[in-house]
Amino acid sequence: MALPFPIPRAHSEPTIPVANAPPVTVTNSCSTTESSDTKIEGLEGKLDRSTAKKEADVEAQGAPTLQANFGDNSRLARLPTWISFWLGYRKTPPPPEKNHIVWIWSFIGAFTCISIIQALFGNVPYFVEKGVPSIGATAILLYGAIESPLSQPRPVVGGHLIGALTGVAITKLFLLLPTEERYDELSWLAGSICCAVALVFMQMTGTMHPPAGATALLAASSPDIRRIGWLYIPVVLLASSIALVVALFSNNMQRRYPTFWWTP
């Protein structure tokens, strides 16, 4: 049945304009998510690169430190190889030696050191009356525990120097007592003070060397050392220097000594 008027196929409501209405932006949620993921991946990449750069910087800073520890600063590195080798310089840390190699060179070093000192102080007329200084405990450390901080040149020479100087100085003060008998009565106190004061001085100066405690104690307890007085100091220095020179040769044959000269 036909109608007397046409019916429109689509009817749209009129649009009412609104003044000053902000534009409405329609965003796609999928594209937003993809953009966020891209940003996150970019940040992760930057963090990874930053972390890798920091690790590379740390490694770069660590390499000279290792070289300095095993080369004991650049001064030894500037010396000729035939000199720096005997002073303990190595470009790379040496591999650990087998036990029998360590035992052989420990024996050779200790035997050579004690033999030279005994021959010198037992046969040279100038040193005979001064007696042989106690260096046996130092030899054990120098040739049997060459990597120990207590066996390095600074503690060996500096510790014995402080022990001898402290022992003689304190003993001289106790010798001001009226009689020798009175000193003998208080010799236990003099020896105790010598050893204790030497220990503190070695701690303060970074020259801790246990055998140097005996060096300080002997200055108060041994009549022969009390008799030579201040000459005890150069005698001890000579003995410790001989032990150190022997150690530089014997300990560097197939091992490495010292690990440091002044600063650990």
Image (tube, rainbow, N blue to C red):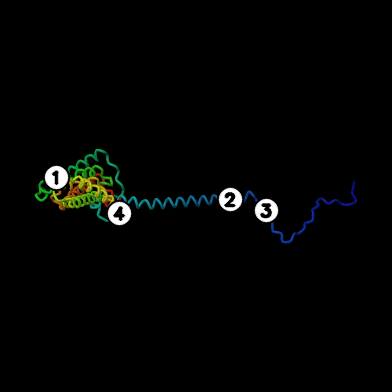
Looking at the image, is 38 positioned above or below residue 98? Answer: below
Q: On residue 118, which mark appears?
A: 1
Report, in whole angstroms, how far the alpha carbon at label 1 lies from the one at label 4: 35 Å
The residue pinned by badge 2 equals 36
Q: Residues within 10 Å of mark 3 (few under 14, many from 20)?
A: few
Q: On residue 73, which mark appears?
A: 4
Report, in whole angstroms, how far the alpha carbon at label 2 lies from the one at label 1: 83 Å
Report, in whole angstroms, how far the alpha carbon at label 4 lies from the one at label 2: 52 Å
Q: Which of marks 1 and 3 is in front?
A: 1
Relative to 193, 65 lies left or right: right
Q: Which of marks 4 and 3 is in front?
A: 4
Report, in whole angstroms, how far the alpha carbon at label 2 lies from the one at label 3: 17 Å
Q: Is mark 2 on a helix, strand or loop?
A: helix
- N-terminal label among 2 and 3: 3
Report, in whole angstroms, how far the alpha carbon at label 4 lies from the one at label 3: 68 Å
Residue at image point 83% right, 51% down: 8
**Disc 3 residue type?**
Val
Looking at the image, is 21 positioned above or below residue 256? Answer: below
**Disc 4 residue type?**
Asn
Q: Residues within 10 Å of mark 4 (few under 14, many from 20)?
A: some
**Disc 2 residue type?**
Ser
Relative to 110, 39 lies left or right: right
Residue 172: x and y, percent? Answer: 17, 52
Residue 175: x and y, percent? Answer: 16, 51
Q: Is mark 4 on a helix, strand or loop?
A: helix
**View extreme (bottom): residue:** 20
Report, in whole angstroms, how far the alpha carbon at label 1 lies from the one at label 3: 100 Å
Residue 85: x and y, percent? Answer: 25, 50
The residue pinned by badge 3 equals 26
